Image (spheres, rainbow, N blue to C red):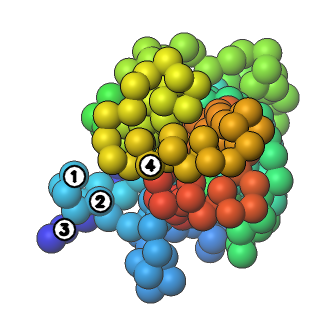
Amino acid sequence: MAYFLSPALVRLRAEINTLWPGRDKSSDGWIGDTAHSARRSDHNPDYPAGGIVRAIDVDKDGIPTDAVVAQIIRDPRVAYVIWNARIWENPAAYPGRGYWRAYTGANAHRQHFHVSVRHGARWDGNGSSWGITRTASAGGGGGGSLPDITVTPVAPIEEDDMYTDEDRQNANEIRRVLGVLGGGIAPATDGERKLVARLAALDALGGILHAVDECRRMLGVVLGWQPPQGPEQAAVKDLRGQKGA
């Protein structure tokens, strides 16, 4: 099956090329190589969605990279950006984020920056302008400084766009377990009854409170309110899938 680059990213690349036609493109790329195809990555075609590729890499040389990246992350189509050993994730797609943090992947992305766009025709299929041409031209060929993301926040997104069906299911299951452990919901399955019986055999108060605290923390991790720690990282990968770059 054929594959193609997201129209949103085709437009982004065109705007950058128009402003800086002589820029270095040796580190540009969008379709995943063998290494990418062996893992989950936005550089791999999404064949169930027609073969769309939702990621692009842009070489840093010949453009004011920091200024361009600052403009890109203000667009609600962006899922995340990786640049210079840091990653920024759109809080509309990753609740609780919206700030730069350390990126510890094998490729620190110091020679190019990576842009992934969100799933859905409203985002990856939207080929409207990114505003880079207008903003950069006003700064004398791309050299103007751009305000930080905290000055111009990402436009608010409806809650339905913030979570996947899988996120909601996981959160609802955890909320139900919290209710069972707290006594507000009667256990309805053998598993829930065994859990309550097992906790009752322990130090009742201490065991229940510990389990409730653990469930509350995991709920926060699943919804992106808290960063995963230790074995939670593997659990989150299983729930959300490994995001590749």
* Disc 4: which residue: 194
Residue at x 71% of width, y 68% of height: 105
Secondary structure state at the residue bearing disc 3: loop
The x, y position of residue 200, in whole percent, is 60, 41
Instruction: Give the mark nearest the N terminus, 1 or 3.
Output: 3
Which amino acid does the dot numbered 1 rest on? Ala
Q: Assign the C terminus to one quadrant of the image.
A: bottom right
Instruction: Give the mark nearest the N terminus, 3 or 2.
Output: 3
Residue that protrudes farthest toward the bottom in the picture? 34
Residue that protrudes farthest toward the front in the picture? 201
- Is the Cβ of the residue at disc 1 closer than 8 Å to that at disc 3? no
* Disc 3: which residue: 2
Residue at x 55% of width, y 50% of height: 198
| Label 4 Cα crowd, 10 Å radius (few <14 / some 14-19 / many 20+) | few
Residue at x 41% of width, y 42% of height: 193
| Label 2 Cα crowd, 10 Å radius (few <14 / some 14-19 / many 20+) | some
The x, y position of residue 180, in whole percent, is 48, 30
**For residue 138, side relative to residue 47 (left or right):** right
**For residue 245, side relative to residue 211 (left or right):** left
Residues at marks 1 and 3, CA–CA distance in whole angstroms: 11 Å
Vertical position of residue 220 compared to residue 30: above or below: above
Residues at marks 1 and 2, CA–CA distance in whole angstroms: 5 Å
